[in-house]
Image: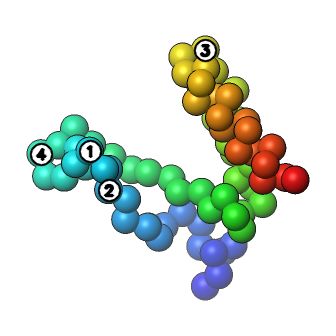
Amino acid sequence: MSDKERGIYQKYNVTRTDGSSGPGGKHEHCNYWVLDLIHDKHAAPALRAYAESCEKEYPVLAYELRVIAEEMET
């Protein structure tokens, strides 16, 4: 079955560098979404959408996401 037919499935194992995704940690049972910034043509629009959503709370993050998205398209 191809990824286009499969939909969402666990493709990656993500751990936090601060250790909080380990047993008993705050993020032990969190789910994460991974974007391939090199090969995924939908990654730049996703970064822009996230930047729009978080801009008021995290203006620096929003700015940096937009810079990355712009660099991806040049």
Q: CA distance from mark 2 to mark 3?
A: 27 Å
Question: Residue at position x 73%, y 36% from top?
Answer: 66
Q: CA distance from mark 2 to mark 4?
A: 13 Å
Q: Which residue is mark 1?
A: 18
In the figure, 65 relative to 1: above or below?
A: above
Q: Is residue 53 visible?
A: no
Residue type at tag 4: Gly
Q: Which mark is residue 24?
A: 4
Q: Which mark is residue 56?
A: 3
Residue type at tag 1: Asp
Query: In the visual, does 47 lie left or right of 31?
Result: right
Q: Residue furthest bottom?
A: 1
Q: Position of residue 26 (x, y in %)?
A: 22, 38
Is label 4 or label 1 in front? Answer: 1
Q: Which mark is residue 43?
A: none
Among numbered discs 2 and 4, the one appearing first in the sequence: 2
Is label 3 or label 1 in front? Answer: 1
In the figure, 18 relative to 41: above or below?
A: above
For residue 35, which quarter of the picture?
Answer: bottom right
Is label 1 or label 2 in front? Answer: 1
Q: In this rendered view, identify the residue nearer to me: 72 or 52.
A: 72
Residue type at tag 3: Lys
Q: Secondary structure at mark 3?
A: loop
In the figure, 33 relative to 54: above or below?
A: below
Query: In the visual, does 4 lie left or right of 60?
Result: right
Q: Position of residue 45 (x, y in %)?
A: 76, 45
Q: How many marks on residues?
A: 4
Q: Which residue is mark 2?
A: 15
Q: Secondary structure at mark 2?
A: loop
Disc 3 to disc 1: CB gap under 8 Å: no
